[in-house]
Amino acid sequence: MTSSRFIFGFDPYAKQVLWLLLLTCCVSALVACVRLFSLVYFNEGFWVAKDANFWLVLWQGLRFDVATVIRLFFPVYLLSMIAIVLPQRIGQWLVSMGFYWGVFISTSILVLTVANQGYIAFFDTPFNAFAIESLAYDKHEITESVWGSGSVWVYLFAGLIAALVCVYMLKHLARWMSGFWIAPSIGFLPSLLVIILSFFLVVTLGRGGVGSFPLSHKHLIVSATPSFNNAVPNGALSVYYAVLEFIDSQDLMPADDAEGKVLYQQFFGQKAEDGALWPQLFTQTPPLALLADSPPNVVLHLVESLGTEPLLPRFNEGVDLVGELGIHLQEDMWLKNFLPEHNDTQSTLIRLLGNINYPTVTQSKYKQVSLESAAAKVFQRSGYKTVFVFTGYEGVRYRSDYFLNQGFDEFVGAHQLSQLYPEMPTNTWGGEDEYMYDYASKLVREHNQDEGPLFVVTLTTTNHPPYKVPTSFADVSIEGISTLQNKIRGLPLESLITYKYTNHHLGSFIRDVKASSKGRNTIIAATGDHGVRGLSGFEGSALLNVSVPFYLYVPTAYKPVHKLNEDQIASHKDIFPTLYHLALSEAPYLNLGRNLFTPSDLDGVHGFSASARYVATQTSAALKDKPSISFPLSPSEGLLLGKAEQFVEAEKFGSALAYKDLIDWIMRKQLKGGVDNSRN
């Protein structure tokens, strides 16, 4: 009894440990309910319980939840350990502090977890660096976009209920514990043993296990199905990794040729030649007299949220979501099995036009670096006038300043469009697409070919949250549109109206150019910057739901010998190599994609497709983070994923898996110096 007096604060310490354990159980149980909802909701039903990974997701998520609570509470726990040798009143004060801190971190974890589900519903991924990058936007823009994306009230209400339930449970647990007394007379040695054992228990649970390595980011991938992996992290954990990702993106490691040559061999399947590596990354289009003498105009339309699924009868069930674009899809070429680079506009834009993966580059200290890999420079060096036309404001993410330094001679945005079209309404993001398309149409139709050919990129904004239907389209009735609500989950029906609006005016642009004299020498391409967000999923629909179309109009004189295989699987990385081959003679370009008109390229090093999460060949697909499991693809089913199967041929996705690392090296090589920007 006497010896226990040397452990003055043992009782408060014991209460702190008990509180921590109760806290952990409470939070883990509530987060598990949210996780269960995520698994059922984003996988369309309780069939997920039959999946072998279902229980693994719940178990791994539980481990992360326990570790998250303990790591956040650990400073208070350590103070309670120190207070063991101090008077009890100090330990008791720490118990009170532990209660309030515990309530705060518990409610924070729960609210963030619910918010994370809302983010997943829209972006199909947990919180990431893009969420932090978006905070750079005006608060008004963010607020309008969030409110316009649908289901916000649902998630706010769910977050509030979760927080109230958590506070209610913790309040009653604390009240019960306040009268709880850990026997103070157990003696010094038993008390010391309890302290040691409890310390090892807390540390073990905080690490996530007794193995050599604690739980980390790599343990978040437990399945080949993204919706399962999305359910693993709680909200606080997602925010933590998003912050780390954002910090990592602010500075870059240098890139040397030794590293690059290793990646070159992994991607191309052969060793690089001696000497500088950079020139070896380029190839060139073949010599063609027609293209040398009469190069065509080229227009590439990047359309906000132009997903493939709503264009198809299996989705729209006869509801007209295509508008004026429909006739051109029938007359011309378009690929349905086509994947976007990313799930957000900025990431796709930088990857497609810059050939780098660094969405925040336009706002970074590297924004003044002129990229040798920039896609527009290939046209610019071939004598083209290059113009970027954007429905949005020029200052959004400093796009105007940035792209004027990446091979574009002109950048026209909403401010300039407002001067040309004083009647154009403006909104959160800029103007309205019909005015942008009208300007682009006139630009092409009135262009003087004696000044050289024209390369134009357009980017729309109307089909973006808050999905404000333009006045000119407000009275347009879309028969049967309400029957499609169940296919877009929480998105408002207005998102389908703005989807048709943009398609309609894109179709008008194509019609006007084709009907003009420029229709004989203008190539028109169109694709979505990403798919329609928030589509209802079903088993095997992961690629279908993110897919975008690739439309192509090629005048008769410029059509290649080989016919386009419209059933092939391809992706954004193949757009510019295809356009280069259609329009340019002997033009060097970065060798990162394939000409879609060349059948033999399907079996070559570029015969794969890539999206934000998946890589795919013509016969199978795999999650980038878990390539050991593949999903068969059938030509008759397009991008519908078959049943997962263990994959044994490691070389099948070899080039595809090396692709991202090579792009990263190309980015660092340019942004950190070492590339001669005087290349001609």
Image: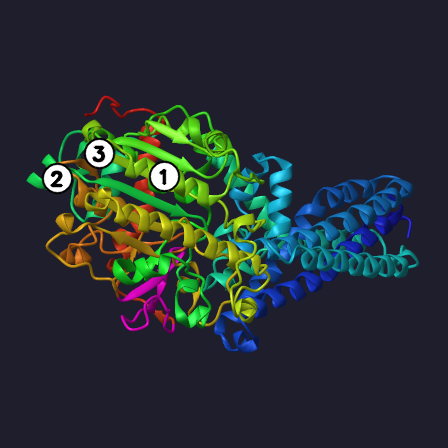
Which quadrant would residue 399 be assigned to in this image? top left
Question: Which residue is depicted at the point 43% across and 40% down?
Answer: 436
Q: Nearer the viewer, mark 3 or mark 2?
A: 3
Q: Earlier in the sequence, mark 3 or mark 2?
A: 2
Question: Which residue is depicted at the point 72% across and 42% down?
Answer: 75
Q: Is residue 63 above or below residue 673?
A: below
Q: Which residue carries the number 3 mark? A: 453
Q: Is residue 555 above or below residue 333?
A: above
Q: Earlier in the sequence, mark 2 or mark 1?
A: 2
Residue 343, disc = none
| Spatial CA span between label 1 and label 3 | 15 Å
Q: Which residue carries the number 1 mark? A: 440
Packing grade of label 3 (10 A; few <14, some 14-19, many >=20) is many
Whole-percent x and y of residue 426?
A: 56, 38
The magenta segment: 619-643
| Spatial CA span between label 2 and label 1 | 23 Å
- Would residue 369 appear left or right of 26 to someone viewing this image? left
| SS for dot 2 | helix
Which quadrant would residue 336 be assigned to in this image? bottom left
- Would residue 249 appear left or right of 208 to someone viewing this image? left
Asked if disc 3 and disc 2 are in contact, CB closer than 8 Å, the reply is no
- Say what amino acid the circle numbered 2 marks: Leu
Residue 189 magenta-highlighted: no
Q: Which residue carries the number 2 mark? A: 291
Q: Which quadrant is home to the C terminus?
A: top left
Q: Earlier in the sequence, mark 1 or mark 3?
A: 1
Q: Is residue 6 above or below residue 403?
A: below
Which quadrant would residue 401 be assigned to in this image? top left
- Say what amino acid the circle numbered 3 marks: Pro
Whole-percent x and y of residue 14?
A: 81, 53
